[in-house]
Amino acid sequence: MNPSLDPLVAAPVPAPARRVLAALALGATLALAACGPADADTSADTADSRAADAAASTDSAASPPPGMHWVPTREFTMGWDGPDARPDEKPSHRVRVSGFWIDETEVTNAQFAAFVDATGYVTTAERAIEWDEISKQLPPGTPRPPDEDLAPGSLVFQPPQDVDGLVDYSQWWSWTRGASWRHPEGPDSDLEGREQHPVVQVSWDDARAYCAWAGKRLPTEAEWESAARYGHDGQRYAWGSELQPGGEHRANIWQGEFPVRNTADDGFVGAAPVRSFPPNELGLYDMAGNVWEWTVDEFDPRTYSLRAGALPSGGCCVDPAGAERAADPRNPLAEHSYVHKGGSFLCHASYCSSYRPAARMATPPDTSLSHLGFRAVWDGPPPADAASR
């Protein structure tokens, strides 16, 4: 990754992004303002959400929901100190995570549709924007945009014909009225033939609502990374040290010139159906690339350094949680900002290489994007043969 493009480096909001901020209420996702922690103490809210998630996913049934795999209790190296590492991924440190069940794939459009059909749930992107809420995430004095710009919608990647550098990503992200999980690229798109694609355009709130209905929860960041790294502890990628071992594409990521031209050497320009690439040793698909995946943890770029600093020499952190309060330099005015993992079909070595398991990104809980989805975990008992695994 080009260090000058590190999204955690403080920088002023570019002029084009300022116009978007004012006119289209894009603030939280496109902000590149100076780093600083949130003002409000959100530790109680964070603890409450973790407790609610854990309660929702605890079930006395002996069998997990279909399509889940057991991740054994294990110790592994979390984070990354090697090539491409960003400051928030350092230092690598030993972590022990208790066993849990995790979805084999990202939640698909078909699965999310079943939830919506059963509950009548309306996602964040399908609701009109509440100016009183979104304005809290914008610089003081940001004028209220016209009512038509507060209509339901979401953020959609649109490849530009050309770019003026890679710092101002409003050049390829566009607020699109009518974009939602049903219409991922806007009102002219739909889900026909994409039933087995990962659902996108879902906010953190939407993902948690689905999990509660399914009797599951979102994973912690440590749980997610434990599952992704299984069998390849301490490696650069989830499958080893090479991006394309033996010339084989192992994940749906960007090839070509980002963000202008995707050559689709891996077979896909956008999101791919789940199970399109080889699974890892646990039988889990798309733990790298395809779409980003929400976790339950608040984001703070200092989390790993603070955690490692509190450990004795050679020590191990057991079942770590995320930050007690958000401190996201990309979204400095947001009260909450949650980690997502795994990278997406938009990741390219020239920009972020976030298809590495250590990579971290975050956005506020009301944000939805055309490359962001999730998978769930379950806290039921281990399989009968867990001791032999």
Image (spheres, rainbow, N blue to C red):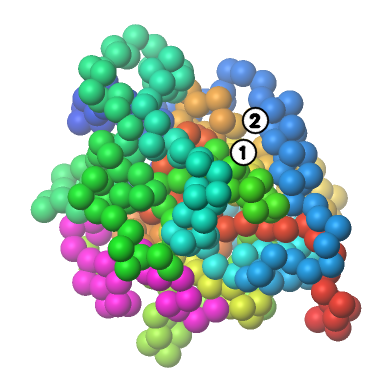
What residue sits 18% from the left and 57% below the top?
Answer: 260
What residue sits 43% from the left and 68% below the top?
Answer: 196
Q: Is 162 placed left or right of 267 in the picture?
A: left
Local secondary structure at mark 2: loop
Residue under label 2: 325
Q: Is 264 placed left or right of 293 in the picture?
A: left
Q: Read off the magenta span.
A: 258-279
Quarter where residue 337 is shown: top right
What residue sits 33% from the left and 39% below the top?
Answer: 154
Dots 2 and 1: beta carbons under 8 Å? yes
* Position in image of residue 261 (x %, y %): 18, 63
Residue under label 1: 298
Return the residue found at the far top: 141
**Other-residue count near label 2 (Cα within 10 Å), few / some / many at <14 / 14–19 / ≥20:** many
* Position in image of residue 113 (x %, y %): 47, 54
Q: Amino acid at mark 2?
A: Arg
Q: Is 178 placed left or right of 382 in the picture?
A: left
